[in-house]
Structures are given as structure tokens and as C-alpha cells.
Image (cartoon, rainbow, N blue to C red):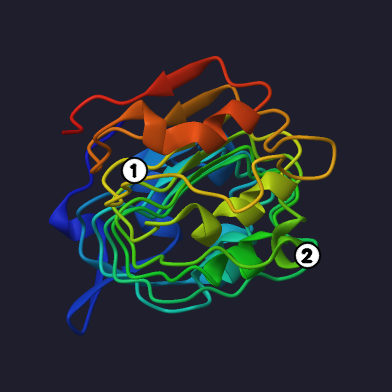
């Protein structure tokens, strides 16, 4: 993978523009058709020349982490990449996002950690029907939207919500609607207990019918007796509790 030099990027005010020339340099090729992956992390990128992206018909993996992207339409721009399946937007300054319906149909892995997103972002992301892995660690998420607003995430298998503010079970219980969710991480959310008023659980006697791995490490749980609701997670095989009191 070729290194990207200062001369490879078009410099604009306060940062760089991601254009076709920069993608070619990162992909180590002179032809857009041959670029399969590109690492453009830590390049002070602030905007995208999205009209250039359509030429990169083979681009599968793109890393844009640790840049200065902060506009809501970044995912609409990325939709110009017809085969993109893995996109890393961690460590930018993104507060909200807009998703074009029926776009990014190949996208399976999305990293949005270390941004400034709130829980309602899941309403937009629910339009990414084929998303399998989603990382929303270290954002400002304090409530997951209602089930009806996130049910579009029907392919999601792995969700990481570490270092947010999801203290109570009621704040994230609506994730129960996701039929394929196998792995859920809630590290460092100040969780003390998982409490539900009705210990008979949801319809059918439980929650999270596919969840196999739940990570509650680095919270404030002092006793397993505070986690009685976990008994209702019918498919659970692994419960991680390291670095609790």
C-alpha cells in the first residue's frame, strides 16, 4: 500500500480534500479500477470530491479515521462507491449523519467510534439493511430509539457501544428487536444493575433471542445478583464482567 505524501493531496482551507488523485496514491495504482483498499487516516481530510468516487468501482475497504470530517452527508458521499463493504470513520467530528434510502447496499462493517453522535443516529443507520458490524463506542449515546425505528438493522450481528451513557437496561432494551444480534459490548457505561419490572420478560419469556456474547466489563456491577435479567437472554453463552468492583 503506497504512502500518501504531502503532494498527493489537494490542500484546501484548514485541511485536505479527498479526491481521485488522493485515492489513487493511497491505493498504489494509476487506475481507479485497480484500487481495492485505501488507508487515508490522519491526513487532515475535511471534505470529499464525491464526483470522483464513482470511478473507483472495485474499492472495498476505506479507512478515513482520525480526520476532520464533520458534515452530515459523508455517508451520502460514500454511497458513490458501488462496492464499499468496510468503512472506518472513527475519530472524526461527526455529530449527525444522513443516509440515502437504498444506498450502500454492500456495506457490512461501519466504524463510527470516537465521534459526537447521539442515539437517534440509529434511526438513520437503520436504512443500512446489510450492515453486519457497527462500532459506536465513545459517542454521546444515552438512549436507543424505539424498536420500530431501528428494526431495519435486520442483518446486524455485532454492536459495540462502549463508553457511552447507557446506564439502565431500559435505555437499550429496544435492541431486542434485532433478530441477528449475536455480540453486544457495553463496556464503561456506568452500569450498576440490569433491572426489568417484569422478570417473565418479553413475549415468549425472554429477550435477545440471538445474543450469544454480552460484554459488561469496566462498569459498576458489584454482584451477579444485580444481573437477574440476564437469565432471560435465552441464547447467551458468554458474559464478560472483568474490571467491575
Q: Is residue 24 above or below residue 78?
A: above
Q: At 23% across and 43% down in the image, what residue appears?
A: 220
Residue 22: name its quadrant.
bottom left
Identify the residue at the far top of this view.
237
Q: Name the foreground residue: 50 vs 239.
A: 239
**Residue 28 in sight in this render:** no
- Tell me, yes or no, if residue 215 can be seen here: yes
Q: Residue 148, which numbered label?
A: 2
Could you say which is closer to the camera, residue 141 or residue 22?
141
**Image side of residue 196 versus residue 37, left or right:** right
In the rendered image, the residue lying farthest to the bottom is 13
Question: Dot 1: what SS?
Answer: helix
Relative placement, left or right, of 158 versus 128 is left
Q: How many residues crowd around disc 2 within 10 Å: few (fewer than 14), some, or many (20 or more)? A: few
Question: Disc 2 versus disc 1: distance between alpha carbons?
Answer: 40 Å
- Which mark identifies residue 234? none
To which residue does mark 1 refer?
Answer: 26
Residue 170 occupies which quadrant of the picture? bottom right
| Residue in view at x 24 percent, y 55 percent | 66
- Residue 28 pos. (x, y %): 36, 35
Amino acid at each position: 500500500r503506497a504512502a500518501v505524501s504531502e503532494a498527493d493531496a489537494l490542500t484546501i482551507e484548514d485541511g485536505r480534500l479527498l479526491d481521485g488523485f488522493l485515492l489513487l496514491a493511497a491505493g498504489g495504482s494509476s487506475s481507479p479500477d485497480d484500487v481495492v483498499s485505501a488507508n487515508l487516516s490522519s491526513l487532515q481530510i475535511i471534505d470529499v470530491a464525491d464526483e470522483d468516487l464513482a470511478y473507483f468501482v472495485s474499492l472495498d475497504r476505506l479507512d478515513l479515521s482520525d480526520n476532520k470530517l464533520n458534515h452530515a452527508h459523508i455517508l451520502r458521499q460514500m454511497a458513490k462507491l458501488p462496492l464499499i463493504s468496510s468503512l472506518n470513520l472513527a475519530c472524526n467530528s461527526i455529530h449527525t449523519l444522513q443516509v440515502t434510502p437504498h444506498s450502500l447496499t454492500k456495506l457490512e462493517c461501519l466504524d463510527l467510534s470516537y465521534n459526537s453522535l447521539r442515539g437517534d443516529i440509529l434511526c438513520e443507520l437503520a436504512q443500512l439493511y446489510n450492515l453486519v458490524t457497527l462500532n459506536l463506542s465513545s459517542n454521546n449515546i444515552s438512549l436507543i430509539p424505539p424498536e420500530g425505528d431501528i428494526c431495519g438493522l435486520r442483518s446486524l450481528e455485532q454492536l459495540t457501544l462502549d463508553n457511552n451513557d447507557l446506564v439502565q437496561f431500559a435505555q437499550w432494551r429496544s435492541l431486542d428487536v434485532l433478530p441477528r444480534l449475536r455480540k453486544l459490548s457495553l463496556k464503561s457505561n456506568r452500569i450498576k444493575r440490569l433491572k426489568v419490572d417484569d422478570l417473565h420478560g418479553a413475549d415468549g419469556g425472554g429477550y435477545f433471542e440471538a445474543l450469544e456474547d454480552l460484554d459488561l466489563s469496566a462498569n459498576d456491577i458489584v454482584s451477579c445478583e444485580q444481573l437477574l435479567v440476564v437469565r432471560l437472554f435465552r441464547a447467551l453463552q458468554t458474559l464478560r464482567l472483568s474490571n467491575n468492583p
